[in-house]
Structures are given as C-alpha cells and as structure tokens.
Amino acid sequence: MKLLVRNLARNTTEEELKSLFSVHGTLQSCTLVMDKETGESKGFAFVEMPKVGEAKVAIKTLNGMDVDGSKIRVKKAEDLVEKEDNESE
C-alpha cells in the first residue's frame, strides 16, 4: 500500500521517515519529495509498505504524530492515474 505523508518539517530526513515507519512493518520504499531548484524538502513523502495490515497500523499510529515540531498527516495515497481516468469519463 502506498502512503502519503504530509506536513513534514523541512528538516525531516528520509532516514528519519524510514525508522518511523519500519517500526510498524516492512518498507518497500520511502521517497522524500525534494524541490528540484532548491534541493530542499517539499514537506511530503511517499512510503510503500507491501503488507496492507502493517500499512493500516502505521496510518493509525503515525497520523497526527509530532515529528520535528510538525504534526504529520498520513493517509493512503490516491492513485492519480485512476483519478484522471475517472474524471475524463
């Protein structure tokens, strides 16, 4: 399951995210989205967890948690391709 992590502090690192989420299960990937021009974090990331049950526990546990002074928001990432397909019908 792909998760969207929002409202991250600009100084939160990918390694910090990996350690936060790996407590709840296996991580397939963790990608902190960076600004191409400045090289700084855009304040959100995508985390993929192959086991749905573990991902749901991570969402429940981590959503609203204070990380580096910011209350993060964690939810299932919407598939943009699916959304666009539905809108064009």
Image: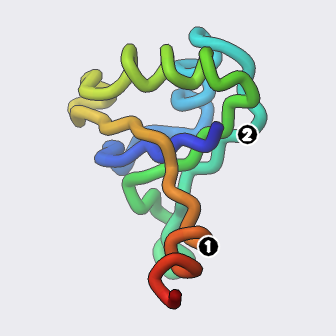
Identify the residue under disc 2: 29
Whether residue 6 is visible = yes
Task: Determine which of the numbered discs, if any, sits on residue 81 in the image.
Answer: 1
* 63 up-or-down from 46: above or below: above
* Circle 1 crowding by C-alpha within 10 Å: few under 14, some 14–19, many from 20: few
The single residue placed furthest to the top in the displayed view is 23
Nearer mark to the viewer, of 1 and 2: 1
Which amino acid is tagged 1? Val
Contact check, label 1 and label 2, Cβ < 8 Å: no
| Callout 2: SS | strand
85 relative to 35 in the view: left or right: right
Residue 88 coordinates in the image, percent (x, y): 51, 89
Q: Quadrant of residue 87?
A: bottom left
Q: Which residue shows up at 64% across the image and 17% down it?
A: 22
Q: Earlier in the sequence, mark 1 or mark 2?
A: 2
Residue 76 coordinates in the image, percent (x, y): 48, 42
* 84 up-or-down from 53: above or below: below
* 17 up-or-down from 40: above or below: above
Which amino acid is tagged 2? Ser
* 84 up-or-down from 88: above or below: above
Q: Real-space Cα distance between discs 1 and 2?
A: 20 Å
Residue 40 coordinates in the image, percent (x, y): 46, 62
Q: Which residue shows up at 35% across the image and 44% down it?
A: 8
The single residue placed furthest to the front in the displayed view is 89
Q: Quadrant of residue 82?
A: bottom right
Residue 71 coordinates in the image, percent (x, y): 23, 33
* Circle 2 crowding by C-alpha within 10 Å: few under 14, some 14–19, many from 20: few
Of the 4 image quadrants, the one containing the N terminus is: top right
| Callout 1: SS | helix
25 relative to 45 in the view: left or right: right
